Image (cartoon, rainbow, N blue to C red):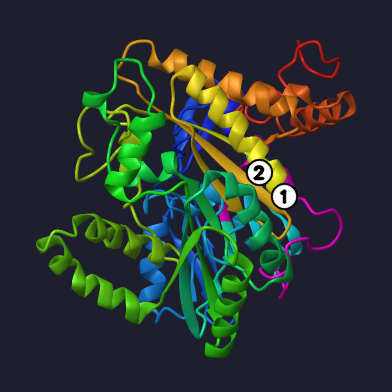
Amino acid sequence: MRLCSQHRVPYFALSTGKNWGYGSASPARSGLAIDLGGMNQIRLYDDKLGYVRVEPGVTQAQLHGFLQARGGRFWLDATGSSPECSLVGNTLERGFGHTPYADHAAHASALEVVLPDGKVIETGFGAFGAVKAKHVYPPGLGPSLDGLFFQSSFGIITAMTIWLMPAPERTCAFFLALKSAEQYPALIEALRPLRLSGQLRSAIHLGNAYRVLPSFTQFPWDNLPEGGTLQGEALARLQQCHGVLAWHGSGALYGTAGEIREGRRALRRALRGLDVKLIFVDEGRLALLQRLQPLLARFGAGRLARQIDLLAPAYGLLHGRPTDRFLPTVYWRKRLPAPSQPDPDRDRCGLIWCAVLSELDGVQADAVQKIATDSLLGAGFEPAITTTFLSERCLEHVISISFDREVAGEDDKARHAFETLLNALLAEGYFPYRLPTFAQGLMDKAQGGYRQLLTTLKSAFDPGRLFADGRYTITNDSDPASPG
């Protein structure tokens, strides 16, 4: 970094480069790539308080294996992406998973940062040396600096402390399927009191039919005209074939046997009156279903057998077990099936995520999904939507645009569809919490005082604007505080 500064060479950093949906390893602007994948040490493990200190090359699979080898007393919170994704990279982008520790940024502390001038600093109490509470109290003393290095271009993080979830006494996953799309806002309203009160502590994920179908099949090219989208009767037939309803959801109950019994009763009460199927799955029931799976396939119940095949990895995510089972879903619009070792970048799978936030409110959630459905179907893409109860008060909506990058013109078409969709959502007050590398210019929409402050900070950390310029920075040259 000192050399780049000395010779004025633009550069950027990547951990494992698997930031799929937001640009993978591509930067906002070109430059020298500093690949941190070789920094893959787990520097520290505290088996009393449950935290680890990891470098940016440490992957989900690596940490999961490390914890299992030590008895599995603590879990990581895994995302549904590749097991080979970086823990640090995902956390710095404010990624999320499935357990009560789903908000990754909220469970991180004590950053080790290399600044653009080559100086190494630690945030929080790490700035004061060997302080006992360094790993467990992120703010430290004085202004809290951690937040400056999340979604920013102020420095490269070379180590981070991550808090782990204590393995609960018992876990019971729940899976639901909503038959009527019209009841989607009512489902949100029914679940909100349980999330707000703390009875449901996991991150609840809801996926529409377009989001769930790619777990079972690919786009029906033989049954639709070239350039068409899956909707209407064709969508209904494919749903019927695979047993996919309007919305599917998952979450988990954690605690003692009594707490889980009460949680199950509360969930049933909350969903009463809705046209919803609800099942509970624990280790025993999952093992029984897996034993029955070959018999079901042999005696003609193939659809149910395929659903059980999907149940195990979904259940595992709620236990902190990373999986690549859902990675083939990004091959939705490819002409050939996903290979046994999926690699979306190698196979030129197109994927853009538009991830916006709303309040935990049924009306707002319904508005987002209607905007996404109308906008993307009109642009020639299926609106695959995942709604996540990100916290007790906030919903996150990931809207996936899947396409085939080997088809001429699809990159431009998908990018235009994203921009049209995002503008429609912005007009109604639904703002993204995370941006693809090509959409970083949205930062320029911030108010003038905020833009000036962000530009001032960038100039203080990186006067030459050499490190990851354009990534969550102000680019509008009309800003008086921005360099010309």
Q: Secondary structure at mark 2?
A: helix
x and y percent of residue 11 in the render?
A: 54, 27
Image position of 284 with respect to 440: above or below? below
Q: Residue at x 73, y 56 (%)?
A: 393
Query: Residue 28, can we see it?
Result: no
Callout 1, which amino acid? Asp
Residue 313 occupies quadrant: bottom left
Callout 2, which amino acid? Ala
Of residues 64 and 112, the one nearer the viewer is 64
In screen coordinates, is 228 left or right of 280? left
Residue 264 occupies quadrant: bottom right
Q: Secondary structure at mark 1?
A: loop
- How dense is the environment of label 2, judged by Cα within 10 Å: few (below 14), some, or many (20 and up)? many
Residue 159 occupies quadrant: bottom right
Q: Rounded to the nearest whole Å, what is the CA distance between mark 1 and mark 2? A: 6 Å
x and y percent of residue 475 in the render?
A: 71, 18
Span shown in magenta: 131-159
Query: Residue 428, can we see it?
Result: yes
Q: Which residue is mark 1?
A: 361
Q: Residue at x 54, y 65 (%)?
A: 99
Of residues 90 and 120, the one nearer the viewer is 90
Q: Are marks 1 and 2 in contact (CB under 8 Å)?
A: yes
Where does the N terminus fall, quadrant-wise?
top right
- How dense is the environment of label 1, judged by Cα within 10 Å: few (below 14), some, or many (20 and up)? some
Tag of residue 292:
none
Q: Which residue is mark 2?
A: 365
Of residues 197 and 326, the one nearer the viewer is 197
Question: Is residue 262 shown in magenta?
Answer: no
Q: Among all residues in the image, which is located at the extreme left?
A: 298
